[in-house]
Amino acid sequence: MEYTRSGEDLFVRLDPGEEIHATLRKLADIEGFDAAAITSGIGRTRNNIYGFMDHNHVYHRHELNEPSELVTLQGNLARLENGEAFTHIHATFADDDMNPCAGHMFEATVEVVAEIHLRILSKAIMSRCPLENSQFIALKFD
Protein backbone atom coordinates (compact mmCIF):
# COMPACT_ATOMS: atom_id res chain seq x y z
CA MET A 1 0.00 0.00 0.00
CA GLU A 2 1.06 3.52 -0.77
CA TYR A 3 -1.03 6.62 -0.24
CA THR A 4 -1.02 10.36 -0.27
CA ARG A 5 -2.99 12.74 1.92
CA SER A 6 -4.27 16.20 1.04
CA GLY A 7 -6.18 17.67 3.96
CA GLU A 8 -9.06 15.28 4.65
CA ASP A 9 -8.62 13.33 1.41
CA LEU A 10 -6.61 10.13 1.12
CA PHE A 11 -5.81 8.50 -2.19
CA VAL A 12 -4.57 4.93 -1.79
CA ARG A 13 -2.93 2.43 -4.10
CA LEU A 14 -3.23 -1.19 -3.01
CA ASP A 15 -0.86 -3.75 -4.49
CA PRO A 16 -1.16 -7.42 -5.49
CA GLY A 17 -2.07 -9.73 -2.62
CA GLU A 18 -3.53 -7.05 -0.35
CA GLU A 19 -7.07 -7.63 0.89
CA ILE A 20 -9.07 -4.41 0.59
CA HIS A 21 -10.91 -4.40 3.94
CA ALA A 22 -7.81 -5.32 5.96
CA THR A 23 -5.63 -2.75 4.22
CA LEU A 24 -8.08 0.13 4.62
CA ARG A 25 -8.54 -0.75 8.31
CA LYS A 26 -4.76 -0.73 8.73
CA LEU A 27 -4.63 2.69 7.04
CA ALA A 28 -7.15 4.06 9.57
CA ASP A 29 -4.86 2.93 12.37
CA ILE A 30 -1.73 4.35 10.70
CA GLU A 31 -3.34 7.73 10.00
CA GLY A 32 -5.34 7.74 13.25
CA PHE A 33 -8.82 8.52 11.97
CA ASP A 34 -12.11 7.12 13.25
CA ALA A 35 -14.51 7.87 10.41
CA ALA A 36 -14.29 8.13 6.63
CA ALA A 37 -16.40 7.95 3.50
CA ILE A 38 -14.99 5.59 0.90
CA THR A 39 -16.06 7.47 -2.19
CA SER A 40 -14.57 5.51 -5.09
CA GLY A 41 -12.42 2.57 -6.06
CA ILE A 42 -11.30 0.85 -9.25
CA GLY A 43 -8.82 -1.86 -10.13
CA ARG A 44 -8.37 -5.57 -10.72
CA THR A 45 -9.15 -8.07 -7.95
CA ARG A 46 -9.56 -11.80 -7.32
CA ASN A 47 -11.12 -14.01 -4.66
CA ASN A 48 -14.09 -11.68 -4.46
CA ILE A 49 -16.80 -12.58 -2.00
CA TYR A 50 -19.89 -10.42 -2.30
CA GLY A 51 -23.58 -10.77 -1.56
CA PHE A 52 -26.68 -9.36 0.04
CA MET A 53 -28.71 -9.37 3.24
CA ASP A 54 -32.21 -10.81 3.03
CA HIS A 55 -35.34 -9.68 4.87
CA ASN A 56 -34.41 -11.95 7.80
CA HIS A 57 -31.12 -10.05 8.25
CA VAL A 58 -29.07 -13.01 7.01
CA TYR A 59 -26.19 -12.46 4.58
CA HIS A 60 -25.93 -14.60 1.45
CA ARG A 61 -22.49 -14.88 -0.14
CA HIS A 62 -21.37 -15.42 -3.73
CA GLU A 63 -17.83 -16.01 -4.94
CA LEU A 64 -16.07 -14.68 -8.00
CA ASN A 65 -12.64 -16.24 -7.64
CA GLU A 66 -11.20 -15.52 -11.07
CA PRO A 67 -9.48 -12.17 -11.61
CA SER A 68 -12.04 -9.49 -12.44
CA GLU A 69 -12.35 -5.77 -12.87
CA LEU A 70 -13.27 -3.75 -9.81
CA VAL A 71 -15.66 -1.35 -11.53
CA THR A 72 -16.99 0.57 -8.52
CA LEU A 73 -16.37 0.60 -4.80
CA GLN A 74 -17.92 2.78 -2.12
CA GLY A 75 -18.76 2.65 1.54
CA ASN A 76 -17.53 3.94 4.86
CA LEU A 77 -15.21 3.29 7.75
CA ALA A 78 -16.07 3.64 11.42
CA ARG A 79 -14.87 2.13 14.69
CA LEU A 80 -16.45 -0.79 16.52
CA GLU A 81 -17.29 -0.36 20.19
CA ASN A 82 -13.92 -1.97 21.05
CA GLY A 83 -12.04 0.60 18.94
CA GLU A 84 -11.21 -1.62 15.96
CA ALA A 85 -11.62 -0.08 12.52
CA PHE A 86 -14.57 -1.51 10.57
CA THR A 87 -15.25 -1.08 6.86
CA HIS A 88 -18.66 -1.40 5.20
CA ILE A 89 -18.16 -1.60 1.45
CA HIS A 90 -20.30 -2.29 -1.60
CA ALA A 91 -18.74 -3.03 -4.98
CA THR A 92 -19.37 -3.96 -8.57
CA PHE A 93 -17.09 -6.47 -10.26
CA ALA A 94 -17.03 -7.53 -13.91
CA ASP A 95 -15.69 -10.88 -15.09
CA ASP A 96 -13.61 -11.14 -18.27
CA ASP A 97 -16.80 -11.50 -20.31
CA MET A 98 -17.89 -8.14 -18.84
CA ASN A 99 -20.74 -9.68 -16.81
CA PRO A 100 -21.34 -7.50 -13.73
CA CYS A 101 -21.65 -8.84 -10.18
CA ALA A 102 -22.50 -6.45 -7.38
CA GLY A 103 -23.41 -6.23 -3.73
CA HIS A 104 -22.03 -6.07 -0.24
CA MET A 105 -18.28 -6.80 -0.43
CA PHE A 106 -17.14 -9.31 2.17
CA GLU A 107 -13.67 -9.81 0.74
CA ALA A 108 -11.56 -8.89 -2.29
CA THR A 109 -7.84 -9.39 -2.89
CA VAL A 110 -5.94 -7.12 -5.24
CA GLU A 111 -4.77 -8.93 -8.39
CA VAL A 112 -3.07 -6.03 -10.21
CA VAL A 113 -3.93 -2.77 -8.45
CA ALA A 114 -6.73 -1.00 -6.59
CA GLU A 115 -6.97 2.78 -6.46
CA ILE A 116 -9.27 4.06 -3.73
CA HIS A 117 -10.32 7.50 -2.48
CA LEU A 118 -11.34 8.12 1.12
CA ARG A 119 -12.62 11.35 2.65
CA ILE A 120 -11.77 11.53 6.35
CA LEU A 121 -14.69 12.76 8.47
CA SER A 122 -12.61 14.31 11.21
CA LYS A 123 -15.52 15.94 13.07
CA ALA A 124 -17.93 12.98 12.77
CA ILE A 125 -18.48 10.65 15.68
CA MET A 126 -19.57 7.34 14.21
CA SER A 127 -19.38 3.80 15.51
CA ARG A 128 -20.66 0.36 14.60
CA CYS A 129 -22.65 -1.91 16.88
CA PRO A 130 -24.43 -5.22 16.25
CA LEU A 131 -28.20 -5.20 15.77
CA GLU A 132 -30.19 -7.69 17.80
CA ASN A 133 -31.30 -10.72 15.74
CA SER A 134 -29.27 -9.55 12.74
CA GLN A 135 -25.92 -10.20 11.10
CA PHE A 136 -25.74 -6.47 10.35
CA ILE A 137 -23.43 -4.22 12.35
CA ALA A 138 -25.28 -0.91 12.34
CA LEU A 139 -23.84 2.55 11.94
CA LYS A 140 -24.43 4.67 15.03
CA PHE A 141 -23.93 8.43 15.41
CA ASP A 142 -22.92 9.65 18.85
Image (cartoon, helix red, strand yellow):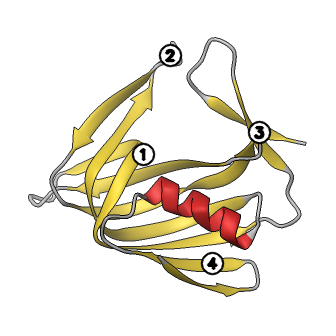
Decide: is 61 above or below 41: above
Q: Residues within 10 Å of mark 4 (few under 14, many from 20)?
A: some
Task: Give the secondary structure at mark 1.
Answer: strand
Q: Residue furthest left?
A: 97
Estimate the spatial distance between the alpha carbons at disc 2 and disc 4, rounded to whole Å.
35 Å
Estimate the spatial distance between the alpha carbons at disc 1 and disc 4, rounded to whole Å.
21 Å
In this picture, residue 39 sits left or right of residue 90: right
Q: Which residue is mark 2?
A: 55
Q: Residue at x 55, y 62 (%)?
A: 24
Q: Which residue is mark 3?
A: 82
Task: Give the secondary structure at mark 2.
Answer: loop
Check if mark 2's residue and mark 3's residue have beta carbons within 8 Å. Answer: no
Check if mark 1's residue and mark 4's residue have beta carbons within 8 Å. Answer: no
Estimate the spatial distance between the alpha carbons at disc 2 and disc 1, rounded to whole Å.
18 Å
Q: Which residue is mark 1?
A: 105
Residue 136, image x and y in percent?
59, 27
Foreground mark, 2 or 3, reads 3
Q: Residue at x 63, y 78 (%)?
A: 10
Residue 76, image x and y in percent?
63, 54
Q: Which residue is mark 4?
A: 10
Check if mark 2's residue and mark 4's residue have beta carbons within 8 Å. Answer: no
Foreground mark, 2 or 1, reads 1
Q: Along the polypeptide, which appears first: circle 2 or circle 1?
A: 2
